[in-house]
Image: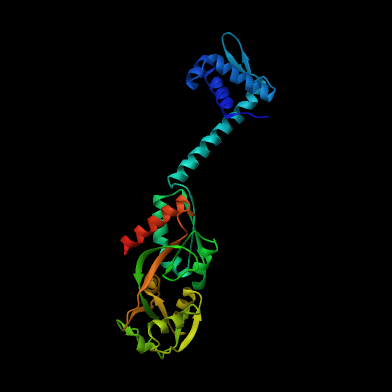
């Protein structure tokens, strides 16, 4: 059984207008051509759908049962067309964003809120991973977009700069440096420190030309864990300045680290535009503009 959209449109038009002539005009066909289309439909379903007379056209019992289904099919077709148009115009889709828990706690909620207000048909799905897992999750296809500091990737990912930040010392208000406006790296070298990620301590030593051997209290994969440890006075943590909005209400101090000031270039990573959906492309463009204009 092969019922065509053309047959369904013809059938619905005739029943709505109760006239072959008027339905033919609406569909831009001749009345005889329209009659042929209806006969083809009735032959296909092997049922008489319309009762014809010289004065009127009426639905048969079978036609009354068939009409709601025909209308439903045509409505679903229109819905599908609108969905495709929305996708092409970036109004629908799904974007998976991978980042650390701290990023979702601090930086990303305002971006998500602004994007959703402008693009209510696009669903944003957060993918939280530890520090070492952000780029890996993107490369393995677990996300469409990553927001993370600049680093080399084994694959050919697209990178776009969104803003700069720098390492700070996060400490309890009772810490001996809590009243300071800035702290040098040399001053904290002998303090027990909390680093985010297993490789963070080594990377800082390399950037500082091995000038200091840090007394590491511990390392953690989660920035939120580090914040909790600092709150419990278990040490001070080296963290990026982006956490300020969430740590200041907790009564913690976030103090810039200087001599030297180390810059962290925060990047938006994505797959090549050949692989990205229109929704992902649109989110990337929006995120870059939003981040650069809001800082």
Q: Nearer the viewer, residue 54 or 26?
A: 26
Q: Residue furthest top?
A: 54
What is the quadrant of residue 44 in the picture?
top right
Residue 72 pos. (x, y %): 58, 33
Q: How many numbered marks appear?
A: 0
Placement of 238 over or under 57, stated as above or below: below
Residue 267 pos. (x, y %): 40, 66
Picture residue at 35% right of the left edge, 89% below the top: 187
Picture residue at 65% right of the left edge, 26% below the top: 65
Residue 79 pos. (x, y %): 52, 38
Placement of 57 over or under 75, stated as above or below: above
Residue 165 pos. (x, y %): 35, 72
Is residue 182 visible to us here? yes
Image quarter hosting the N terminus: top right
In the drawing, does residue 61 fall left or right of residue 270?
A: right
Picture residue at 57% right of the left edge, 12% below the top: 56
Q: Residue furthest bottom?
A: 190
What is the quadrant of residue 258 in the picture?
bottom left
Is residue 19 visible to us here? no
Placement of 279 over or under 181, stated as above or below: above
Q: Residue furthest right?
A: 46
In the drawing, does residue 141 fall left or right of residue 293?
A: right
Q: What sort of colour scheme is used for the picture?
A: rainbow
In the drawing, does residue 45 fall left or right of residue 238?
A: right
Q: Nearer the viewer, residue 188 or 155?
A: 155
Image quarter hosting the C terminus: bottom left
Picture residue at 45% right of the left edge, 55% below the top: 273
What is the quadrant of residue 291 in the picture?
bottom left
């Amino acid at each position: 059984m092969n019922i065509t959209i053309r047959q369904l449109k013809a059938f619905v038009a005739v029943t709505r207008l109760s006239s072959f002539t008027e339905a033919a005009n609406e569909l831009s066909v001749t009345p005889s051509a329209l009659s042929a289309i209806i006969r083809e439909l009735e032959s296909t379903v092997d049922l008489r759908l319309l009762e014809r007379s010289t004065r009127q056209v009426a639905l048969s019992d079978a036609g009354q049962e068939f009409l709601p289904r025909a209308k439903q099919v045509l409505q679903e077709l229109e819905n599908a067309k609108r969905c495709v148009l929305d996708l092409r115009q970036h109004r629908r889709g799904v974007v998976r964003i991978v980042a650390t828990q701290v990023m979702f706690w601090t930086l990303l909620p305002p971006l998500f809120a602004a994007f959703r207000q402008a693009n209510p048909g696009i669903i944003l799905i957060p993918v939280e991973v530890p520090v070492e897992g952000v780029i890996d999750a993107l490369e393995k296809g677990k996300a469409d977009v990553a927001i993370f500091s600049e680093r080399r990737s084994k694959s050919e990912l697209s990178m776009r700069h969104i803003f700069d930040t720098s390492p700070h010392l996060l400490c309890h208000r009772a810490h001996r440096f809590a009243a300071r406006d800035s702290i040098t790296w040399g001053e904290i070298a002998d303090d027990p420190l909390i680093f985010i990620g297993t490789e963070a301590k080594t990377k800082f030593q390399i950037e500082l030309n091995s000038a200091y051997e840090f007394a590491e209290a511990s390392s953690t994969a989660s920035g939120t864990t580090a914040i909790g440890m600092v709150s419990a006075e278990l040490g001070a943590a080296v963290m990026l300045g982006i956490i300020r909005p969430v740590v200041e209400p907790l009564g913690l101090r976030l103090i810039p680290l200087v001599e030297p000031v180390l810059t962290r270039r925060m990047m938006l990573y994505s797959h090549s535009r050949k692989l990205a959906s229109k929704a992902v492309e649109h989110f990337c463009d929006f995120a870059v503009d939003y981040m650069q204009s809001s800082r």
